Image (cartoon, rainbow, N blue to C red):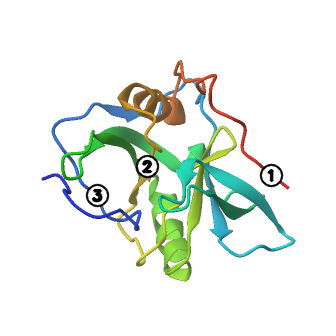
Amino acid sequence: MCLKHGFILAVGLLASCGAAPVFKRSTVPPSVRFEIRTADTVPSPSRIKMLQVGRTDPWTGVEKFLYVDSTPVFTNADVVETRVLEQTYHGLPPDYNVELTLTSSAKSRFAEFTGKRVGLPIAMLVEGKVISAPLVMDRIPGGKCWMGTAGLGQELATQIAQGIVGPSSFQWPRTEAAPKQD
């Protein structure tokens, strides 16, 4: 069943639309650097000011910044498989998300991590850019989460999913600006 309304604010909510290929961890090192970091909307001297890829305030057009810790809490090593999910909203073109299945050891750490982050955003980075910053709505015990891909399309979402667990041809589009930092 596809989610047809509203914005997704929790990484624990999964919506699968049709069969999607599953990419399992490969013996070849991942080609896409993936990280989950703590983040906040409030500036802090210990955090880096970053722009989320493709995100601006829909009413004002002002870029939305996030303040992200420099040290990752989770990385590629914590992901055992990925797949791409299609997301549809009332007549809008589909968007694509990457579902991440965590290792058994990361599953319990993720549940604890999200339990402490309820009501706060987390930053999901691909190659050093914030690609998704969901607001954690509840503790997520299942060992699965998903990352929005900021409207990058099915092909790039698939390359990201492949590259998190193994080799991929992913490259940022040339028009994509580097994340802004202070």
Residue drawn 76% across the image and 59% down it: 49
Give me the disc on residue 148: 2
Viewer-nearest of discs 1 and 3: 1
| Sequence order check, earlier mark of 2 and 1 | 2
Residue that lies at the very extreme toward the top in this rendered image = 169
Q: Is residue 122 above or below residue 157?
A: below
Q: Do callouts 2 and 1 mark residues in contact (Cβ within 8 Å)? A: no
Q: Of residues 12 and 77, which is closer to you in this image?
A: 12
Image coords of residue 150 (percent x, y)? 47, 44
Image coords of residue 66 (percent x, y)? 67, 63
Q: CA distance from mark 1 to mark 3?
A: 31 Å
Give me the disc on residue 134: none
| Sequence order check, earlier mark of 1 and 3 | 3
Image coords of residue 9 (percent x, y)? 40, 67
| Sequence order check, earlier mark of 2 and 3 | 3
Q: Is residue 174 above or below residue 22?
A: above
Instruction: Residue 54: name its quadrant.
Output: top right
Instruction: Residue 82: name its quadrant.
Output: top left
Viewer-nearest of discs 2 and 3: 2
Residue type at the position of mark 3 = Leu
Viewer-nearest of discs 2 and 1: 1
Residue 17 in the figure: left or right of residue 135 = left
Q: Is residue 169 above or below residue 125?
A: above
